[in-house]
Amino acid sequence: MSIANTSDPAPAGTDLSGRWQALVADDDLRRTWLDDVGDDDRWEAIEVPGHWRSTPAFAATDGPLLHRRRFTHDRPTGEDRWWLVLDGCFYQGDVWLDGAYVGDTEGYFFPHAFEVTEALAERTDHVLGVELACSRPSNLAAKRNLTGSFQHSDAIDPAANPGGIWRPVRLERTGPIRIRHLRVLCREASEEQGVVQVRAVLDACSPTTAEVRTTVAGVEVVERHTLAAGENQLTWIAVVPEPDLWWPHALGGQPLHDVDVAVGIPVSDDEDAAVEVSDRRTRRVGFRQVDVRGWVASVNGERLFLKGATYLPTRAALAAATDEEVRADVRRAVDAGLDLLRVHAHIGHPALYDAADEAGLLLWQDLPLHGGYARTLRKQAVRQAREAVDLLGHHPSVAIWCGHDEPFPVEVDAEIGPVPASVGRRALRQQVPSWNASVLDRSIKRALQREDGTRPVVAHSGVAPHPPKIDGTDSHLSFGWGDGDERQLPGFARLLPRFVRFVTVMGPASVPATDDFVDAAAWPDLDWDRLVRGHGLARRLFERHVPPADFATYETWKAATQAHQAVVVRRQVEELRRLKYRPTGGVVVHTMTDAQPAVSAALVDHARIPKPAWEALRAACRPVIVVADRLPAGVEPGDALALDVHVVSDLRTAVEGMEATVTATWPGGEHTWRARGDVGPDACVRVTTIQLVVPDAPGPLTLDLSLTGADGEVLATNADTSEILAP
């Protein structure tokens, strides 16, 4: 078929974002709000895109809110069809145009489109209305909104409300056929060929013949199809020979290719006839394959130990996040040596996925489910899983789908915050079936696997091994915080290796650098209740690990919380890296950044000022590290210590002729050990075991480690301390 004479009109549309009007809905107002458009004095101006609480008049309301906008528009001509598109609404909406009901929306992260051709043909002056509801959950164990972290997170104020039209609103013009849904997936990627699978739902206003043209990486696929009036589902592939493969940044480059899909109507039955393009869409792909076996990931067949961090919403008010702010977070993660961000219980800002594609940063993508949900939500959750695949399936950075984070209730005390449960208690309460974990999550997983067979799917996160398969998923561990002393992790891993196969939550909280929301002058009588309620402070856990009563000033307590966080983060990442592939496939620190002012586990605060733990994570994630068994917190003279020293390398080439130097120092003395050897590519080796009888010298015992290459270059350093107790 010839397409040389194809006519490609420029995209056309009308932006309806900007200044709207809004009022809190009531029954009387609902009867007149679209008719009495001259009564402007009662209405408040509101910006779209945005969240209604960003407008002072609605700063304390939970809605629902009526939004309206007047606009003028020329009447449609010829065979043009016009569509009203709302790119994102929190959370449920009813849409009206010129007093006539258009349709409803549910789901915050994907667009909703409605044909409005007839309404635009009737007049040139129009009133668009959207009634939007985003109720706050009254029962966190049976939520009804699929908003994930935005309405259920330790680090976002539970009194906040994300309600609003947070993404643009516009009118789009197409010809007689519209591409109503488009899904683009990389089905296969190898040095020999790449296969792109495209699924489209074409909406035709009448029966017709359509020509569908797909171009990607210099390959063009043209097909003709007979369409019925209404929706038509088509699936096809494009095969690209010898594609340039997309790699995570640690393994290679990130070539990206536009997949252009144009649908048109031939002007005659002649195969060489010109085609008038009716609609077109473009998606960007990278050729790569991801696999996870035994919780060890591989990309294009190359095994990769995943070092990552949880990523909360960029901002609690996501519409306020800028593209550059999101891109800066991605650069920050790559600069720290991270391979993975876990997009925690939400679908993020669109810029996140483009930036991750370009930077070679993998994403563990949660659906927006966290905690417990009502039994009526299964159908809606499955629908939104399909929408997530349509929205994000083409992004090479999206490596893993996860259906539901922690599908079990979490006890929260109004005065002390989340009530900690040990890893043992968490495992025990997951041994019996539940509607969320056993029914809802199974349906979501099946939907994701059915709609996208190109990525691994995790049904739920943080679920311990349980009957009947006794398998479990990734682990949420909290040694040094909710699970006891941080030095217990190595013993726990030896006892229960299945629990450390892939860790996606670990790390304690600390006070942020940007703490102007804390009245430090009131120390020690801070407004603890306010910090617990609105800023995520886990009071009981701070009292366990860094008790405020032990510190004379706020600044010394703040510094101690940050130091504790830094030590735990570095040591536990290093400990899990020492278990590389035997059995650990990766570690994800919780969390990278704050979405709002918070006393949280974030390593970078809401103003994007790093805490000391951020540098600790960077050190623990360097390509090559040297690490020794952890010293006990205290030792006594005469104790015999035997400490293994390991070198871990994520490099793809061997490090030969290295020398590890370990120096123990105590009051009045020191001793040095040296060992030489090689470490293979992507490997962990034990280079030596140092043995030391603790001397009778009360005071600090320090262990300094250094690793040098054959040319004398320092590849890695490390240190640990203990205290020699008085006899």
Image (cartoon, rainbow, N blue to C red):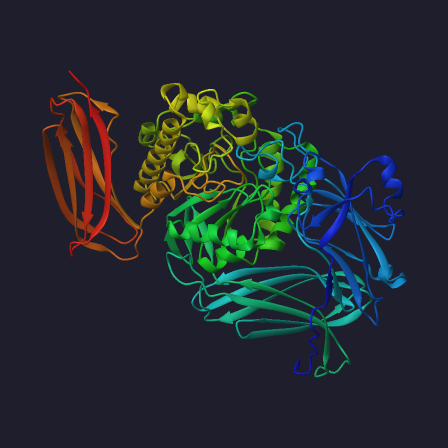
Question: Is the C terminus in the top left, top right, bottom left or bottom right quadrant?
Answer: top left
Outermost top residue = 727
Q: Nearer the viewer, residue 369 or 325?
A: 325
Whether residue 477 is visible = yes
Task: Residue 713: give x, y in percent of width and height.
Answer: 19, 54
Question: Is the N terminus in the top left, top right, bottom left or bottom right quadrant?
Answer: bottom right
Whether residue 90 is visible = no
Q: Nearer the viewer, residue 607 or 481?
A: 607
Note whether 506 is above or below 586 in the view shown.
above
Outermost front residue = 521
Q: Is residue 324 left or right of residue 674?
A: right
Note whether 126 is above or below 65 in the view shown.
below
In the picture, residue 8 is in which quadrant? bottom right
How many numbered marks are there? 0
Q: Nearer the viewer, residue 453 or 340?
A: 340
Q: Is residue 594 left or right of residue 202?
A: left
Q: Is residue 572 left or right of residue 525?
A: left
Q: Residue at x 74, y 83 (%)?
A: 270
Task: Residue 275: give x, y in percent of width and height.
Answer: 72, 78
Note whether 567 is above or below 104 in the view shown.
above
Q: Is residue 353 left or right of residue 68?
A: left
Task: Residue 45: give x, y in percent of width and height.
Answer: 74, 46
Q: Nearer the viewer, residue 463 or 352?
A: 352
In the picture, residue 477 is in which quadrant? top left
Task: Residue 153: give x, y in percent of width and height.
Answer: 56, 34
